[in-house]
Image (spheres, helix red, strand yellow):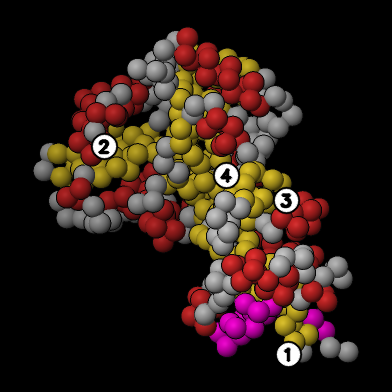
């Protein structure tokens, strides 16, 4: 008896994959004009097949179905889950789905979104996906598709949720105030408010909760940041924040590494020295360097570093008496994690290994403190460096900020 096998698609199967996808779509009763409109989007070239993560289910040489996983871990997209019409309803869809999740986990994905065929939405929901909104069809102008999401938690991500999230309101500067509002924690600071949340707040009236935070800080004439992660629940939290007037800032990737792995003697470029400091004057010099890179929006940084220098370990990189980079470490009370912050480097000194050296310096101190993991909310510039070092991306984080009317 011939068994069904899963394997990577071959470039010479490109035409067959497109035709299979169209037959699968036709199963739902679409007319020929509709299918002709979808043909271009559902056509594959040999180069596409070679470059993409397309997996086929085969019985001997017969193609039964296929799927693809696209994107850059930890966030990706499940696309093109199509079956031959004769094989729909026989369990093959579940097998492809389970294989897709297994391969996505192996590739480091923790969140997958799905632009679902509307008639297949029920299947995905039954498999554990949740609806997060709608997305426009790539073939039919004005047609909207169900946008779904499935989470693939890992032990490392679960450890991050368990240890790092609570530290956002447990490890604070002396002049910060903490208030509880249902499942969230509202943090009051002189320059901006902050909202910390557990992963799942879906058991409350989320829209009312968001509105209360906005109105609270509106009464203070103060902006507020609501920190979100890609795997948060409810899955449509970002759209709810947008509807309440919050706006997203730059997305960052949460990267985690074992501290002992990076606790090596750092290598710095000629003329650069790195030292630990708790001097107020150094904090002001670090702040000035950051303002030079990022502009007046970070003028508060020096004061923050001064207020928190008894809680954070700060390192400054200098050349010729000038600050060229700086980074600090935020140890957590339970010693499981320490956050690496900063790392901004003056433009003329980038690409010389200073950021990598700052990671090593901080890792050595972390190990001495008994800390197990380091995490970084990495920008697009920092992520490649951390990946080369061996840090693992586990989720992404996006701050949603509400600002009072001018």
For disc 4, the marked residue is 230
Q: CA distance from mark 2 to mark 3?
A: 39 Å
Q: Earlier in the sequence, mark 2 or mark 3?
A: 3
Circle 2 sits in a helix, a strand or a loop, which is it?
helix
Task: Report the magenta residues as a range.
Answer: 3-21
Q: Earlier in the sequence, mark 4 or mark 1?
A: 1
Circle 2 packing at 10 Å, graded few (<14), some (14-19), many (20+), is: few
Q: CA distance from mark 2 to mark 4?
A: 26 Å
For disc 1, the marked residue is 61
For disc 3, the marked residue is 129
Circle 1 sits in a helix, a strand or a loop, which is it?
loop
Image height of 38 relative to 130, above or below:
below
Of residue 293 and residue 15, the one placed in the foreground of this image is: 15
Q: CA distance from mark 4 to mark 1?
A: 39 Å
Circle 1 packing at 10 Å, graded few (<14), some (14-19), many (20+), is: few
Of residue 19 and residue 376, the one placed in the foreground of this image is: 19
Q: Is residue 401 visible?
A: yes
CB atoms at circles 2 and 1 under 8 Å apart?
no
Tell us which disc is closer to us: 3 or 4: 3
Quarter occupied by the N terminus: bottom right
Residue at 64% across / 32% down in the picture? Answer: 198
Tell us which disc is closer to us: 4 or 1: 1
């Amino acid at each position: 008896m011939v068994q069904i096998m899963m394997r990577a698609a071959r470039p010479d199967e490109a035409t067959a994959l497109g035709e299979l996808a169209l037959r699968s779509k036709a199963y739902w009763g679409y007319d020929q004009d509709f299918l002709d409109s979808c043909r271009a989007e559902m056509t594959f070239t040999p180069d596409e097949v070679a470059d993409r993560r397309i997996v086929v289910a085969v019985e001997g040489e017969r193609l039964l179905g296929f799927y693809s996983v696209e994107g850059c871990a930890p966030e990706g997209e499940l696309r093109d889950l199509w079956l031959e019409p004769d094989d729909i309803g026989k369990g093959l869809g579940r097998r492809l789905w389970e294989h897709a999740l297994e391969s996505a986990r192996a590739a480091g994905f923790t969140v997958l979104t799905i632009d679902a065929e509307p008639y297949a939405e029920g299947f995905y929901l039954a498999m554990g996906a949740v609806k997060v909104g709608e997305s426009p069809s790539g073939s039919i102008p004005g047609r909207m598709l169900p946008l779904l999401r499935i989470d693939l938690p890992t032990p490392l991500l679960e450890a991050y949720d368990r240890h790092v999230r609570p530290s956002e309101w447990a490890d604070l500067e002396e002049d910060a105030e903490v208030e509880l509002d249902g499942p969230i924690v509202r943090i009051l600071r002189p320059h901006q408010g902050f909202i910390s949340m557990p992963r799942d707040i879906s058991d409350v009236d989320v829209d009312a909760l968001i509105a209360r935070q906005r109105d609270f800080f509106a009464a203070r004439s103060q902006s507020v940041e609501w920190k979100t992660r890609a795997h948060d629940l409810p899955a449509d939290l970002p759209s709810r924040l947008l509807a309440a007037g919050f706006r997203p800032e730059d997305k960052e990737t949460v990267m985690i590494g074992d501290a002992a792995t990076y606790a090596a003697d750092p290598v710095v470029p000629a003329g650069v020295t790195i030292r630990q400091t708790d001097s107020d004057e150094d904090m002001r010099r670090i702040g000035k360097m950051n303002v030079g890179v990022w502009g007046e929006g970070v003028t508060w940084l020096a004061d923050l570093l001064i207020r928190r220098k008894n809680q954070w370990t700060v390192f400054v990189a200098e050349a010729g008496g000038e600050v060229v980079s700086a980074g600090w470490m935020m140890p957590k009370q339970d010693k499981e994690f320490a956050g690496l912050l900063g790392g901004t480097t003056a433009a003329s000194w980038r690409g010389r290994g200073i950021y990598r050296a700052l990671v090593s310096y901080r890792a050595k101190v972390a190990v001495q403190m008994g800390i197990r993991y380091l995490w970084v909310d990495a920008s697009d510039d920092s992520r490649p460096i951390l990946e080369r070092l061996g840090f693992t991306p586990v989720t992404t984080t996006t701050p949603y900020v509400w600002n009072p009317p001018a």
